[in-house]
Amino acid sequence: MGKWSRFNISSVVLGFAFLYLPIVILIVFSFNESKLVTVWGGFSTKWYVSMFSNRGLMDAAWVTARVGVISATFATILGTMAALALTRYTRFRGRVLFSGMVFAPLVMPEVITGLSLLLLFVAMGLDRGFLTVTLAHITFTMCFVAVVVQSRLITFDRSLEEAAMDLGATPVRTFFAITLPVIAPAIISGWMLAFTLSLDDLVIASFTSGPGATTLPMKIYSQVRLGVTPEINAVCTLLIAVVAVGILIASIANKRREAQRIVDEQAALRN
Amino acid sequence: MQRLAAAVASRLVIAVPYVWLLVFFLIPFVIVFKISLSQTAIAMPPYVPTLGFSDGISGLFDGLKELSADNYIWLTEDSLYFNAYLSSVIIAGISTILTLMVGYPIAYGMARAPTTLRPILLMLVILPFWTSFLIRVYAWIGILKPEGLLNQLLLSLHLIDQPLIIMNTHTAIFIGIVYSYLPFMVLPLYSALEKMDYSLIEAAQDLGCRPSSAFWKITFPLSLPGVIAGCLLVFIPAVGEFVIPDLLGGSQTLMIGKTLWNEFFANRDWPVSSAVAVILLLLLVVPIMIFQQAQARAQEQGR
């Protein structure tokens, strides 16, 4: 491998500065004493206090959290099934249509997805609200889960499953004893991706949600339209913190599992 | 018995997500198409005919006769829509090229980084993707405003003596799209560049090839699958983008995602917004098909 040239180092450093600087600025100004978002008036946590006493904001956060957990869970189950169907069954009727329906939502403009789901719910006679947002979020996030799990399944060593079946395990048992534990990290990161996508979504939620089910992004958006205040920075900072803690926990858990695996392997080799 | 259980399980694994996507992804498009042929009405839902079986089969047929292409004719008559489609494609196209130009050096630098450093760099590219899209766009408002941080910085350095007007212009939209979609560009580029055999470049240079022509003759063509995947991942969603033009672009920017939103939420004209969506979808069908082909091919190769 050649040396890492100065040009390459500076393009990576500049690139990351571009990616992270706006987020850092946003977080810094959430602690601003002044009401202006761009002028520093001293350190203060008053915007966090006012955020927690904002009833509408807190209600929206609670709705968002519930929609996120429920939709991510269903999306993970459906997405994992879709990934299994795509990697394990190369031949079934309508496979081309199926893989098209899995990949297309990844790039589909959100306004189209949102509008079409809303019209479906109206046609089905469902009232817009908590249920419809959740159904919409399951649908568009399951495809992201499918892609994440699929990429793990492709590199999966099938001989492990064959060995289990040779030793007399049923296919269903083999799945739960061998396949599922191996692809578990991908399933977990799929769940987290689905959860953050749901947490993040404004456009699809605006179309499919109704009175009483305002999500946090919808609330943030309507406040941003009225004017930029440090209170929104505080909400955003807290959201970023929630996601960052989630990622941290997941990566520590992953490391630990990896370390345990190495210990187990060495123990097995000694025996 | 066990074999039966396995057969049932494998059927279910295919059928459940299949049926779900048919109901919640494919059928909605049929409904959008149907409503795009209806007329606006002051009712709930705000269009006629509603087409149901409530009036029996004959009622359904009467309803079918009332469908018309009026909304599409209306879209061609009003130049607003044509201009919105055109400027969406142009803005998305320019933004995609800019994202490629910003993302390529980053991906290249990452691919040439020491092997121990690469997983961390990869993590750092993915991380912003986990923070909210809305938040990342919002963060730019404070930076780009006339009295914002960028102008404060440039004024205090005496590089400019008048604040730059970036907010509510196309430049702000370009910055917003490049920023928000950069990880989508860098990741496929990186995975293409990382697989590349750099001894090819050394060989070319040993044979007297200049670095720049070695790049265009060897590196760039070999990274082409990554370039195509990255550009499609940026271009397709950017054409229908709503949040970025709405928050950074101001009122006079014309993008089709915003037009559709206004048609739906402000004018409550469901049939016209459906027609707008159908044409947008037709516009994007070819890029989406190319994207799917590329995905399927990558999947076959990974096997």
Image (cartoon, helix red, strand yellow):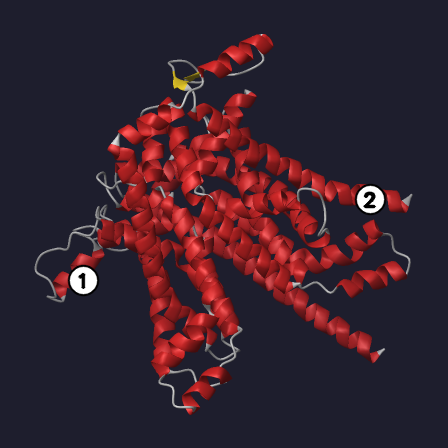
Res A224 quadrant in image: top left
Residue B248 in percent (x, y) is at 27, 46
Residue A216 visible in the picture: no
Residue type, numbered disc 2: Ala
Above or below residue A27? Residue A131 is above
Q: At x 47% / y 68%, what residue is drawn?
A: B190
Q: At x 79% / y 43%, what residue is drawn?
A: B9
Chain hosting mark 1: B
Res B215 quadrant in image: bottom left
Residue type, numbered disc 1: Leu
Q: Which of A83 and A43 is in front in this view?
A: A83
Residue A174 in percent (x, y) is at 82, 55
Res B83 quadrant in image: top left
Mark 1 vs mark 2: give the one in front: 2
Residue B296 visible in the picture: yes
Chain hosting mark 2: B
Between the residue at mark 1 and the residue at mark 2, the CA separation in whole angstroms equals 66 Å
Please give the residue where the numbered disc 2 appears in the rendered image: B7
Q: At x 29% / y 34%, what residue is drawn?
A: B81
Q: Which of B290 and B97 is in front in this view?
A: B290
Q: Quadrant of the N terminus of chain B?
A: top right
Please give the residue where the numbered disc 1 appears in the rendered image: B153
Residue B104 in percent (x, y) is at 39, 68
Sequence-earlier tag: 1 or 2: 2
Above or below residue B109? Residue A234 is above
